[in-house]
Amino acid sequence: MIKNTFILAITGMLAMSTGCHAKFKKAAPGLGQVKTKTFGAPRPTVDLGGSDTYTNDNLLDNVVSAYQMGREAELERKIIMAVDPESVGWALEDGVANGIGDGPPFAWTGDKGRNAVLQLEIQEYGIRVPNLGAQGEFTYVVKMRIYTADADRVYSGRIRCEAPIGDPKVFSRAFGGVNNVRQIKQMSDGELQQAFETMASYCGDRIAARLRKHAG
């Protein structure tokens, strides 16, 4: 009985894992042309990492944490002033459009008429440093939903896209001494805008690849 129950449980798990995108696989060939709609680009965030790598002293931890919070706020202000969220959303759509093209699993269209729609919700974007002194990363979190022309949802998923900031020296990266703050401060407003748009376009291409995979 125990053995049979175990087999049934495993069978059920396999059915769930193979069937989680079954509706999308079935619907994808009939979607035709799909337009994109992006919304929800929030204010960019900056996370410079903590001090755990260096010390267990609570007082020093508090001092470092307070200092990091101040630098995070400073960089957030710089990025907010430099980066246009609407342009970031357009770059994400461009990445999806270029990645999907004429398909598969469906064709992208710029026509805003009555078509199926790929809805992209940018839930988070900004800069993250895993720990103090490590190389920073651009990071985006995007939720994807696909609706048919009749507003039937056939797909839902989420993706996190990450890519390293700049090109720090190998020596600095190897010894945990990357100065992410200096790298970002040295970037002009135009360079920051271009960097965030490039990252958004890259994430759009990854979304296209994810959809192609899930469509089978």
Image: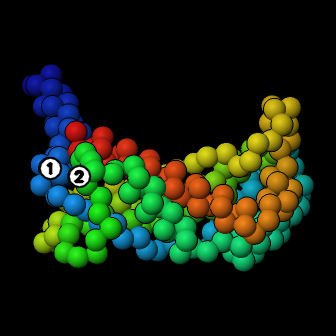
Residue at x 51%, y 56% (from the top left corner): 201
Closer to us: 10 or 132: 132
Task: Give the answer, above or below, for where 173 lies relative to 183.
Answer: above
Could you tell me which secondary element the residue under label 2 belongs to? Answer: loop
Task: Say which amino acid is labelled 2.
Answer: Phe
Q: Mark 2 points at which residue?
A: 106
Residue at x 30%, y 44% (from the top left corner): 212
Structural distance between the alpha carbons of marks 2 and 1: 7 Å
Mark number, residue 29: 1
- Check disc 2: other Cα within 10 Å, few if <14, some if 14-19, many if 20+: many
| Residue 143 drawn at (x, y percent) | 40, 61
Could you tell me which secondary element the residue under label 1 belongs to? Answer: helix
Residue at x 49%, y 52% (from the top left corner): 203
Are the two marked residues, 2 and 1, in contact with CB atoms closer than 8 angstroms? Answer: yes
Task: Give the answer, above or below, for where 202 lies relative to 33.
Answer: above
Closer to us: 8 or 47: 47
Residue at x 17%, y 43% (from the top left corner): 19
Does residue 56 appear in the picture of this structure? no
Residue 142 in the figure: left or right of residue 187: left
